[in-house]
């Protein structure tokens, strides 16, 4: 496996964090639109629940079958 440039890796990680933040901001706006009477505390609670549940990715983001983690050593 080739060693990648640390700056390139840092840029990719920074982009991943920015995309995460953008997704959270979009969901917050969505919740405010759907629940206009909700308090900021309720929006925060629903956002936290959404982040924990991860609809559509309950078993993770990768393809394949779920396995126990950590894997048992053979």
Image (cartoon, grey):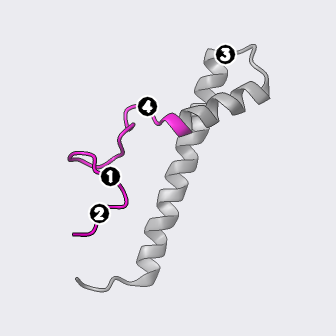
- Whether residue 17 is in magenta: the answer is no
Helix, strand or loop at label 3? It is: loop
Q: Rounded to the nearest whole Å, what is the CA distance between mark 2 and mark 4?
A: 28 Å
Tell me the residue at 71%/15% (across/down): 36
Residue 8 x, y percent position in the rendering: 41, 76
Find residue 74 and report its image quarter.
bottom left
Find disc 2 in the rendering and name its residue. 72
Helix, strand or loop at label 2? It is: loop
Find disc 4 in the rendering and name its residue. 55
Find disc 1 in the rendering and name its residue. 68
The mark lying in front, picked from 3 and 2, is 2
Q: Is mark 2 in CB contact (under 8 Å) with mark 4?
A: no
Q: Is mark 1 in CB contact (under 8 Å) with mark 2?
A: yes
Q: Magenta residues, as a range?
A: 52-74
Q: Rounded to the nearest whole Å, what is the CA distance between mark 4 and mark 3?
A: 19 Å
Tell me the residue at 23%/47% (across/down): 63
Find disc 3 in the rendering and name its residue. 35
């Amino acid at each position: 496996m080739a060693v990648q440039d640390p700056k390139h890796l840092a840029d990719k990680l920074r982009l991943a964090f920015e995309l995460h933040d953008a997704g959270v901001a979009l969901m917050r706006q969505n919740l405010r639109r759907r629940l206009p009477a909700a308090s900021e505390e309720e929006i925060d609670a629903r956002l936290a629940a959404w982040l924990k549940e991860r609809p559509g990715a309950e078993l993770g983001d990768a393809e394949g079958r779920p396995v126990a983690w950590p894997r048992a050593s053979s």
